[in-house]
Image: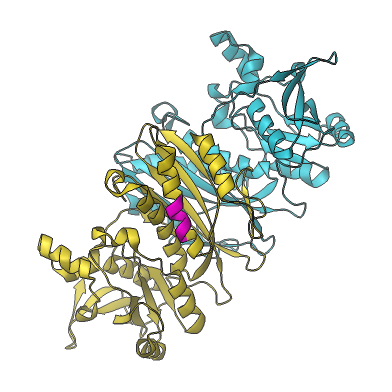
Chain colours: A yellow, B cyan
């Protein structure tokens, strides 16, 4: 089966100027001479943890596996260029399953100008695991890091949060275009994507930047799915928004004047919302709007340590 | 457990000039401005397929997982610079197991100037899988491809073949230094590493180059382990040498005059041996030295399709 897949891949992903040597040699060659600071990230998704293969089928898995990696490149405001795909397939996997996974991956890859540059396909008597490495390039504006937030910066987020388990964790759009556009046109101090939960990831950004965050609870954009889930499980929708994770929206640290401009201009197709302010200190604080604040424990899903 | 590992990794692998942003942000940044053609490769190793965790322990797994990737970079005569490590760990894995795996990986990484630039650590209720992506740089001499062999070139190999299952598949030395040295100092037309079996991989090189190979059977360097295995299983040692795989030695296509020079100079610490000649046509041929030849079926272990 592995050789069938390799033949199929070789035909499917030919060489290109960006990829002078592609699938079929010992390694792929990527020409990065136009922007030689590479951004590299890897994410492994596993059956029973990140998806349930029996329920969701191959297409959603393929798309998600690439999308989570593109979201990491978006978090750095990097231009995606290539991906490598490693598969551990259950021995009875049909070729159709694999090609369906690749077709879905491809749609997303095409949308973001990403070439599938290689991979490693293996079989075993255990569940499916898929590990993708995405490679991007730092733009002339430099990379957007987690560590640049300073007290006084406003906390802006794209989109809405919570309830992703109802479907959004498969069909989310990695915020690549949004991150590149904002980073190109505006002064951003820091950024990251929300994979493990808004509050947990915001706490990580604070830690990396050496500051604290005061969150204005009533401003957090709550996804309709968070409300649906709340009706089902009785957990408040705001708690889903803060803790569910896999929203794959951006958290940005933006100087006050720029934030005002962004909030009034709304330059993206997705809404930008201010949810609080970075302040001196450490940790997360709940700001009640009357000048009082109480500590907020970061909550989220520790589904992996992505480095 | 995942957060413990991440803290450990972050301390262990600090930033460097080559790695201005390392473990802990959404992605790593690699500065490739000194040689902006990147070589990327990925290999996934799985318990029960590439190792047996209960028998071999963590150190051999960590070393092998990185070494097979470095061997792919060697095959391209690329300079290794970084690696990303994704893990699917059985839920009951101890932190000590993971750190032992990394310590072994590190020894090899240090030896080859490779930085561990990131990864993704996950747990599940299934066996261990480890997927590494290695990134290298094409040198000023360009990349060494599979596709450059021309009829008349001599087939040279490093080291000896067969019986790697007895231990060599864990302790082999990726031929990075050898490939870089030869490619720098001599005219090489094509090259690859032997992962799936000498005859199978040679057949692949022939296919990529559009030529055939005549092998002189009695010249094939047979590893002592192939003879030991032969005594155990009754299979001729030469068959082990041709088909076992995981030797991770180099096959090179070298113009005749250069080959003579290399064979007499022996510029490497490991022996260089001529095992035949590339000729017009297709496939592998067994050359009996009396002007006759018979076709040779490529044999090897299809343990994965590495692209």
Q: Is residue A268 above or below residue A118?
A: below
| Residue A54 picture location, percent across and down | 28, 43
Give the left or right position of residue B9, taking residue A37 as reference. Answer: left
x and y, in percent, of residue A226 in the image: 20, 67
Q: Which residues are magenta?
A: A103-108
Residue B236 image position (x, y, % from top left): 63, 11
Q: Total marks drawn?
A: 0
Examine the image and state in which quarter residue A199 appears.
bottom left
Which residue is most to the right?
B257
Say above or below: A188 vs B76.
below
Q: Is residue B59 left or right of residue A253?
A: right
Where, by quadrant of the figure, is residue B260 drawn?
top right
Q: Nearer the viewer, residue B233 or A209?
A: B233
> From where the camera sits, is residue B271 visible?
no
The residue at the point 49 percent across, 48 percent down is A85
On screen, residue B237 versus residue A62, left or right, reads right
Rendered image quadrant of residue B230: top right
- Locate the C terminus of chain B by quadrant: top right
Residue B302 shows in the view: yes
Q: Is residue B146 magenta?
A: no
Please state if A294 lies on the left or on the right of A158 as rendered: left
Please provide percent x and percent y for residue B191: 72, 39
- At horizontal 38% and vertical 32% (from top left) the residue drawn is A92
B83, above or below B16, in the image: above
Is-magenta flag for residue A106?
Answer: yes
Majority SS type along the magenta span? helix
């Amino acid at each position: 089966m592995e050789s069938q897949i390799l033949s199929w891949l070789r035909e499917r992903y030919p060489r290109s100027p960006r990829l002078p040597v592609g699938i079929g040699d010992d390694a792929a060659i990527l020409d990065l001479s136009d922007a030689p600071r590479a951004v590299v990230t890897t994410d492994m998704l596993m059956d029973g943890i990140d998806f349930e293969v029996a329920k969701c089928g191959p297409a959603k898995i393929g798309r998600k596996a690439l999308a989570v990696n593109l979201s990491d490149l978006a978090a750095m405001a990097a231009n995606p260029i290539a991906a490598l795909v490693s598969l551990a397939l259950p021995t009875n996997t049909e070729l159709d399953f694999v090609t369906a996974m690749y077709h879905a991956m491809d749609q997303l890859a095409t949308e973001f100008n990403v070439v599938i540059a290689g991979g490693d396909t293996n079989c075993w008597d255990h569940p499916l695991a898929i590990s993708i490495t995405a490679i991007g390039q730092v733009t002339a504006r430099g990379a957007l890091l987690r560590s640049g937030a300073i007290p006084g910066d406003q906390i802006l987020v794209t989109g809405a949060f919570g309830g992703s388990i109802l479907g959004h964790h498969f069909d989310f759009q990695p915020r690549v275009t949004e991150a590149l556009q904002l980073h190109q046109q505006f002064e951003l101090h820091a950024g990251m994507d929300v994979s493990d939960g808004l509050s947990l990831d915001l706490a990580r950004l604070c830690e990396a930047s050496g500051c604290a965050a005061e969150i204005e609870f009533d401003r957090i954009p709550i996804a309709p799915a968070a409300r649906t889930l709340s009706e089902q499980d009785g957990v408040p929708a705001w708690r889903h928004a803060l803790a569910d994770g896999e929203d794959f929206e951006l958290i940005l640290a933006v100087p006050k004047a720029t934030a005002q401009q962004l909030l009034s201009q709304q330059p993206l197709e997705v809404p930008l919302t201010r949810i609080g302010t970075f302040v001196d200190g450490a940790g997360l604080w709940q700001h009640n709007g009357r000048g009082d604040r109480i500590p907020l424990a970061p909550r989220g899903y520790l589904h992996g340590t992505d480095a």
